[in-house]
Each structure stands twice: as structure tokens, then as C-alpha cells.
Amino acid sequence: MSVGFVMIVHTALDRAAAVARHWAEAGCPVVIHVDSRVPEAEVMAMQQALAGLADVRFCARHPCEWGTWSIVRATLAAVELALAEFPAIGHVYLASGACLPLRPAADLTAYLAARPETDFIESVTTDEVPWTVGGLSRERFSLSFPFAWKRQRRLFDQLVTLQRRLGIRRCPPAGLEPHLGSQWWCLTRRTLSAILTDPDRRRIERYFRRVWIPDESYFQTLVRRHGRRVESRSLTLTRFNRQGRPFVFYDDHLQLLRRSDCFVARKIWPGADWLYDTFLDPGLPSRGAAEPDPARLDRLLTAADDRRVRGRPGLVMQSRLPSPDWAHATTCAPFSVLQGFDALFEDFAPWFERHVGARVHGHLFAPDRAEFAGGGASFSGGISDAAALRDYDPGGFLRNLIWAGRGERQCFMFGPADRQEISWPLAIDRNAHIAVATGAWAVPLFRSGQDFAVLRKRAAELQRIEAAFLDILRAPQVRARVRIWSMADAVRTPMEVLLGLVEDIAPEARSRLPLAAAPRLVPLPGFGAFLQRLKNEGMLPHLVGDFPVDESRLRPPPLRRPYLVM
């Protein structure tokens, strides 16, 4: 017994002819159906290329249109000719002009000879199909589809809507339970003969003529009626992306296709010379009894599809922008946002940079300009400090800065006086580590010496802005790592707060941090009285924390070694 091939061809006829010759020369009969819309000159060229091969036939041509009965009609015509012309065929393998054998035909012949009564076809009920794309699953069997989806899309959609409104439902013929699956199958002669000679064939075909995409359901349904032993899988390697489009294999997929051990792959790019030359080589080594294992490719193909749709975190391409609904980060690497600490500690930025080994910027979102580390007018990658450029797309500015500085931890200062459009992008980025000392904005106001009426108004504004930022950081959508202290707590236990900041970036540096290296708190004599005056004037600085009028009660405990122990 041998296997025969039925090829449904409509493009790249030269490649299809090369594949047909490969199978025919290996002793496998081939029947070819060419779409009647293909120019006659191209068909004649294909026939001439296969002239002299006794096991190649061309069947009657029909026009084929995606999603319609015409593809099933063409397949049935080719199958009928194959069974009539080649009585030694035990299995019929359906392939397209874009298919390519990955193993010698002898491997497939031996594999099927060991399973003479097995039909290989993906066949599952509509409730069990997770990959249906387009919104029509059960309805493809209960509604009528006389119009072509690609060519008559408006009529198609209007008729579907009308049938839904009128409650029209078609029932399949008695005894049939509709099944779905891949178009590409390998069925036994017995099963195909039973399908062709079914006494209810005309009634069944009338029903399937109005089913949507019947090439994925006609044989898949009837094999359950006539097959003796069905293995619900295809011997053809074919994969689809999340839009329902097939993956196209190119020359650089050669090693992946080899490792799959599949007999045939689809869909192959017509220009993949290396693939065609390699797999159509008569000297291609046998894989023996190796079982086809397309799952080996699933992980890589899924990752490739995810990369195509989502791209790389932190890198935006023209055709794709990050979605806030995706769980992965919008930046490419972890970074830190520090709010209030530069106001509480003297020379905080250089100290932090020195002890954690990070690049510490100033206020990147200050109103007038981006304060890059070192005070430069641009950062790596030519990122400008111009506020207008930054504010055009604050999220994109930060994403580019983290990408340009990848390999080195980026940190920057933030506060209520800065531009706040970046607040939500920071909060939903799982790469962001945000540390806040609430109420620290009051320290620069206290030390500014401005008119108190102006200070009170400004303090109320900054507190309102910071409170809104804290509400964002406490929202359920937040994915950033957030740590919050009140200013009063930071003043009471400064070393504990500083060690927490260091540990967040460089845990190993915490135990090595010398006591003398800690930055000093800014002098705050009279700060408690300043806060009390704000209260007396009607402004309650509640974000500062419990800060007494007598600062001696807030004096931090003496630094002891236990603070440095994990």
C-alpha cells in the first residue's frame, strides 16, 4: 500500500510542481487541482514541467474562493480522480501548493503502513475549539452563508445580522454532529470511499454549501461518521497567529523545521530557496520511525507572535504602541523613583549614586527642563533636556531614557512640583520602584524665606498634588513596587529609611554601608513652628506626619550597629 497526494494549488505553481515531482519520483501518486482563475499559460507551464511523470494527474478545474464550498468541491474532484486512477493508494494526503515535505516520502509511507486503518485529521466539536477567530463558531453551522466573506464582506455581514434578528437557525442533517479542524488531513481509502458513496451525500452537501469555511468542517464531520480509527491531529505542521493568519516559514526556520520531525510543513514562502533545496534533496536522510512533534515549535512560535504584537518592553516601533492593559512592563529595565529624599538629606543624589552603583538624575520632570545626571543638556542616545520635547510624550521620554541607559540602573527624583502627567505610566510599570517621603515638599518652602501668605497657598497646592499621586500609587491597577514613609517617620529613623532605599537596589550594599557615610538631615530648627503656623492659618499639612512643635521630641535615636544588620 502507498500514499497518494492531492494538491490544491492557486499560486507559485513552479514551487508546487517541484514538490509534486519530488513525491512522484519517490513512488507516490499526485493529483493536482489548479484554481480555474489561474491563467492558462501558467497551468500549461506546470504541466510541461511535470510531463513524463506517469503518477501525476491534473483534475477538472474549479474556481476556488476562501471560506466557500468551492474549495471542498475542488478537493472532492481531486480525491475522486486519485482513488479511480491509483487503486494501490491506501491513504490520501491533502496538501496545498505552499506545502513542503520535511522528510523523505519513504518515512511517511512506512509510518502510514504501520497504521493502515487510521485517519489523521483534526476533528473536534465546536465547544472544544479554542482557536476559532472571527466570532463565528456554532453560528457557522446554524446560519446560511451564500456570500463570500472576502469579496462580498458587506453583504456577508448584513445577512448575518438579519438572520440573527429574525432568529433563523439551520439544523445539520440527522445523524451528523458538526466538527471543526485543520483543512490539511490524511485519510484512508476506505473512509474517503465511504464519504463519496454516502447515500445521503447530496443532502449533506446541500447543507455544507451554506456553511462558513466548510473545508474546515466537511471532512472533519464526516470522518466521525465513516472512520474506524480517528487520530485527531494533522500530520502537516501549520501554525496560526492570534489573528488567525498562518505563520509563514522562511529560510531561517530551517533548523526549527528539522527538529519538528513533521512530514509536511505549511506555509512556505515561495522565495525560500534554501528550504526547497534542502528538503527536496533526494539524498535527504531518513528520520526513521521518529514521531512528528510539532509542539517543539509552539514555544518559539508563540514567543515570536508575542514579540510581533507586543514588541520588546521599553522599545516602541511604528506599528505598535504599548497597551496599559498588558501585564508586562512598558520600560525595558528596573528603575527607581525617589520623592522627597533630596529635600530631607544633604547631598543625597551623589551619596545614593555612590553607594548603589546607579545613575542618579535630578528632577527629570521639572517644569523648566529635564535634570540629567551631571547637569548635561542631553543624555545617552541624544535625548534632549528640553521640556517641550519631554512633555510631548512623557511616557515615551522615560521609556527612551531607560532604554538608552540599559545595563545601568537609572534613578531620578520626583515631587509634586514636577510635571504629573507621568504619574500613571510610573504606577502601572512593573519595572518602577517608587519610594516616597510624604510631606517633604514642605522643607524647601520652610527654607525659602518667602512671604508666608504665598507659602501657605503653595503648600496647599503641593499637598493636593502629592495626595493625588498617593491615590494613584494605592490604586488596584498599580504594578510598580511602592514604599511610602511620612516625613516625620523619615526624620525619626533616617538610617532605617536610607538602608531601605539602598536595599531596594543593592541588597548586598546594606550590610557594608558605613555609619559615617550616611548623608545628614537638613537643619530643621523652627520647622515644627512653621507647620503649626500653617495650621493656624487654615492649611493642615497632614502628609507631613506627626511632627511636633518641639523638634527635640523628634530627635532621631543615636546610630547603632543594629541598624546595619539584616
Image (cartoon, grey):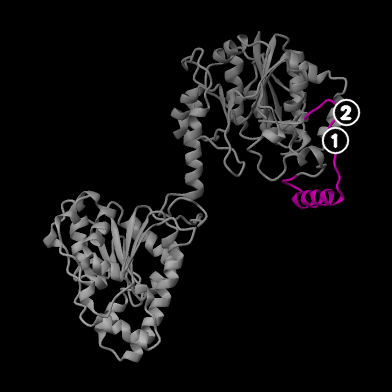
The residue under the point 20% across, 75% down is 552
In this picture, residue 490 sits left or right of residue 115 = left
**Residue 466, relative to residue 21: is it above or below?**
below
The residue under the point 51% across, 42% down is 305
Give residue 371's position: percent from left, percent from top: 28, 70
Disc 1 target residue: 171
Q: Are marks 2 and 1 in contact (CB under 8 Å)?
A: no
Hey, which residue is sitting farthest left in the picture? 516
Q: In this view of the protein, can residue 502 be seen by the observer?
A: yes
Give residue 104's position: percent from left, percent from top: 53, 16
In this picture, residue 350 sits left or right of residue 12 = left
Tell me the CA gap for discs 2 and 1. Answer: 12 Å
Mark nearer the viewer, 2 or 1: 1
Disc 2 target residue: 203
Quadrant of the image occupied by residue 462: bottom left
**Residue 214, relative to residue 339: is it above or below?**
above
Give residue 128's position: percent from left, percent from top: 67, 33
Question: 55 or 243, which lies in front?
Answer: 243
Q: Amino acid at mark 2?
A: Arg
Q: Which residues are magenta?
A: 149-177
